[in-house]
Amino acid sequence: MKLSLIDQAKCNSSIAYALNSLLFAYLKSVGQDTKDHAIMQELSRVKSYMGKIKSAENKSQGPATVIDKEAASRVVKHALSGNSKIDAKNLEKTRQQDNANKFLQSMAERSLPGVGTHKRFSDDEDDGKGEGAKGNVKDRKKRKTAVK
């Protein structure tokens, strides 16, 4: 028969306590003083182990405290709500971003179709011939006509 770990510990500690109690009873029956005898230390050691086993058994059965979920959710909710000054700044920042996005949207709707959607060559770009910003006039005209 297989026993769980806690049951095995209970069984072993009970056997140890029973044997030590029998020895204690024998010493008392013979008339020996047991107050300073080593059997008293052994009995107290076994008792402490039995107490540890009992506390481990209580812990394994589950928590003794019951958590109030509603109160815990209120505490967490209020703790995470944040600072009102910071929340106000963040709200203002998001409003400004929304306004900027709306403005850009309206500008894009008002502009001519196709304008701003292609890549333009800047005057500072190198044309690959090592001539720098000035480049060849014919090449620049070709680029401008190709872009349109």
Image: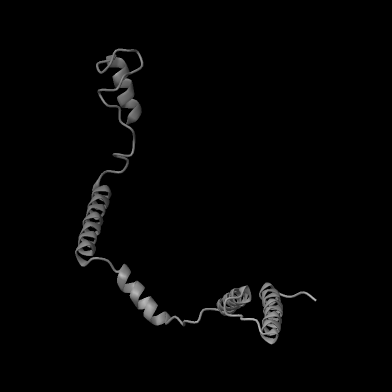
80 to 67, vertically: above or below: above
Count of marks overlaid on the render: 0
Residue pictured at 33% horizontal, 39% vertical: 117
Colouring used for the render: one colour
- The residue drawn where x is 67% and y is 81% is 24
Q: Residue furthest bottom?
A: 29
State the image coordinates of residue 49 (x, y, percent, origin top left).
60, 74
Q: x%, y% of residue 85?
A: 19, 64
Instruction: Farthest residue to the front: give it.
Output: 31
The spot of residue 32 in percent (x, y) is 65, 81
Say which of 2 and 128 sits in front.
2
Judge by depth and name the residue closer to the eye, 15 or 43: 43
Position of the C terminus by quadrant: top left
Relative to the observer, which residue lies in front, 18 or 94?
18
In the figure, 88 relative to 147: above or below?
Answer: below
Corner quadrant of residue 70 = bottom left
Describe residue 80's horizontal placement relative to residue 95 as left or right: right
**Residue 36 location in percent, x, y?**
57, 76
Q: Quadrant of the N terminus?
A: bottom right
Q: Is residue 103 above or below residue 145?
A: below
